[in-house]
Amino acid sequence: MQNWKKKLLNTAIQLDDIFDKQVYRLRQRLGIMDTIHVFPFRTYGTPHHVYVRGRVLEDKKIASGSTTDHLFTNLLNMYKRFETDEVPGATLQLDLPGGPVKVVSDKEGYFVFNFKPATPLLTQKLYLTLPLQLVDAPGPFTKAVVNAEMMIPPADAEYGIISDIDDTIIRTGATNLVAMSKTVLFSNAVTRLPFAGVTAFYQALQLGRNGKRNNPFFYVSSSPWNLYDLLIDYMDHHDIPQGPLLLRDFGIQSESFMSGNYMSHKFIAIKQILDTYPHLNFVLVGDSGEQDPGIYQEVVKHFPGRIICMYIRDVAAGNKQEIAQQVALELKTAGVEMILTEHTVKAAEHAAANGLIFTAEIAAIVQDEKEDLGQVPGKVEPGIL
């Protein structure tokens, strides 16, 4: 970043910190703080490495969406997500077999547990549930225990899947500002619609060829953490396999706020996943609308032999489509196939031909795609694209 930009960013951060502190103290004195709540994020780790993170916020009481929600209700809930009241200086405790561990939330309300446990964490399930509680905070709170979910991929997982979100599994129109704004501001977890066939294809990838349904999913997106609850509810509603969401900080504290470079966020997040599981190879899924092909190409360069293949949803036209096609040619030379397609079934056929999913799953994916498109009955939501 240029020197003047760094100075401007540092000044903006200082002013933002001063303003936040003054507003927080004023609300404390006036006694108008809402109840403080802990929001743990779904994370990933290993039996020998605990990584749990989340955020402490005043509870805005945002309800899960429904098909009957008015557009104004969705807009109000979106406003609440971005107009957060962070709680700095809150003490959180994670209870483990080797004893409790405590951390304190930072000035944006974020907290991170990142350590090696005294006793290895063993589980027969894909997710390990860890008791987490708020033990002290500068405001009204209830000492309730919440469950932090940490995914630990089993040793017999065949491969992992790292997927983008916007315009990969959710039709957001990220390449069109008006369409994207309409989707982001006026829809909810139920009315946001997936691309046709995504649910069945992702379930087939999770099932793999061993039939144990334990191939781990990771979702890496440039969307802000403010949308975490919405994205989790969306995936649950549409039966898309659960997985850690690796989003980005939307605040002024982030350098990407000034630089606009979100490529580094995605690359770093993917690198950390591959570094954490050196024994596991990965399938990458994204779209051609933004920077996914270029980011994934860099991943291949830094981790030779670790990327099985890529599936890129073709949502772009013109220059971006040409760039994606060029990346596909370069990757083929490097020995990695990048399937650029508008249709989920084509990606599924490639996956079956290359031993990633059962061939029998293709029929279910075709059916799911037809139901999503409204070509055959089976799903309530109309107009899924």
Image: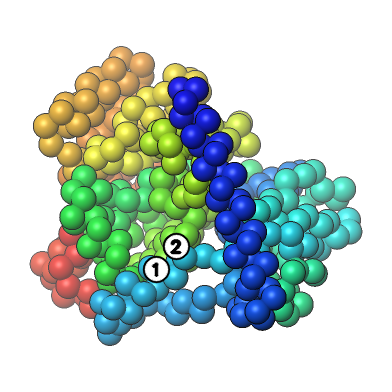
Residue 28 in the image: x percent, y percent?
A: 68, 73
Q: At x 15% / y 64%, what residue is drawn? A: 373
Is residue 284 visible in the rendered image? The answer is: yes
Residue 221 in the image: x percent, y percent?
A: 42, 46
Mark-to-mark CA distance, 2 and 1:
5 Å
| Label 2–label 1 contact, CB within 8 A | yes
Please name the residue that numbered disc 2 is placed on: 82
Residue at disc 2, secondary structure: helix
Q: Is residue 92 found left or right of 220 in the rendered image?
A: right
Is residue 232 visible in the rendered image? The answer is: no
Amino acid type at circle 2 is Phe
Q: At x 33% / y 41%, what residue is drawn? A: 286
Please name the residue that numbered disc 1 is placed on: 79
Residue 276 vertical position relative to residue 204 in the rendered view, above or below: above
Amino acid type at circle 1 is Tyr
Q: Say few, some or many: other residues with alpha carbon within 10 Å of mark 2 (under 14 / 14 to 19 / 20 or more).
A: some
